[in-house]
Image (tube, rainbow, N blue to C red):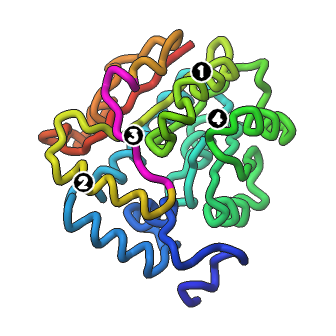
Amino acid sequence: MTDLDWVPPGIDTTRPSAARVYDYFLGGTHHLPVDRELVGHIEAMTPDIGATMRANRAFLQRAVRFLAGAGVRQFLDIGSGIPATGNVHEIAQAEAPGSAVVYVDVDPVAVEHSRAMLAGVAGTGVILADARDTDRILRETAELGLIDFGRPVAVLLAGVLHFIPDEADPAGLVAALRSAAGPGGYLVISHATADGQPPEVIEAQKLSSRTGTGIVLRSHAEIASWFDGFPLVDPGLVHIPLWRPGPGETVEHPERFGAYAGVGAA
């Protein structure tokens, strides 16, 4: 297989993709030279970036285990990216057989690979949609017939809201998704921040604009405000390695990861 054999037709291979860059940091194989070039620039400025992205994936996995243990059987994963080991459906269905998972991403490469990987996997579906288009996401999710919005839903927004610019009203789109989660539902968010970060880290974040999906760094207070009506479960909104780490997962200086994570319950 060459670098391009797996890329769906019509994809611009001259511009880096946020989903493929993320895949690289997670140890995946679905990335191109243009993505790896950007990775090199980012790593030169922020050596911890790969660890941060892996910590975000680990947080998501811990959160899904917690939710499955709390009785959740429906998961809507927005900004799911290219499939990697330990995806939401693998965790959820291992913990609670019969769980339903719908993945949503705006990147056609991520969606095509998700559909190929999930072909024949019961209880899973994939939607190509922008996270900002909540009406479409909710409509197409309902049309798949996998998730019943009359029952509790866990809405997963792990590492996606920092790609939403202020003018797109991230607070409004989160509010719409909170409403759809319904009584007994949950909201999961992880988000990059400038809080406590050195100037070189903030400069490195600006390189994300080359992917066409630049990152907006936000404060603890702003991110916490999106959980309105969904009280945070312990330990609250914290640096991602601090959200219910397992044995041996504790890290020194968790602030160096430059991102917060939290889970709210309706």
- Label 2 or label 1, whichever lies nearer to me, is 2
Report the Cα–Cα distance between label 2 and label 4. 34 Å
Residue located beneath label 4 in the image? 75
Q: As displayed, is residue 121 above or below residue 192?
A: below
Mark 1 or mark 4: name the one nearer the start of the chain. 4
Residue 214 is covered by the magenta coloring:
yes
The amino acid sitting under disc 4 is Phe
The residue at which mark 1 appears reads as 175
> N-terminal of the two: label 2 or label 4?
4
Q: Which residues are magenta?
A: 213-223
| Amino acid beneath label 2 | Glu
Q: Is residue 220 magenta?
A: yes
Q: Which residue is drawn at the image coordinates 46% and 32% (left, top)? A: 189
On-image quarter of the N terminus = bottom right
Q: In this view of the protein, can residue 246 be seen by the observer?
A: no
* Residue 17 x %, y %: 51, 65
Nearer mark to the viewer, of 3 and 1: 1
Q: Please, what secondary structure does the residue beneath circle 1 have?
A: helix
In space, the residues marked 3 and 1 are separated at their CA atoms by: 22 Å
- Which structural element holds mark 2? helix
Q: CA distance from mark 1 to mark 4?
A: 17 Å
For the stretch drawn in magenta, the main secondary structure is: loop
- Label 3 sits on residue: 59
Residue 264 percent location from the top left of the image = 48, 19
Is any part of residue 146 visible from this angle? yes
Q: Earlier in the sequence, mark 3 or mark 1?
A: 3
Amino acid type of the residue that numbered disc 3 sits on in the rendered structure: Phe
Q: Secondary structure at mark 4?
A: strand
CA gap, disc 4 to disc 3? 15 Å
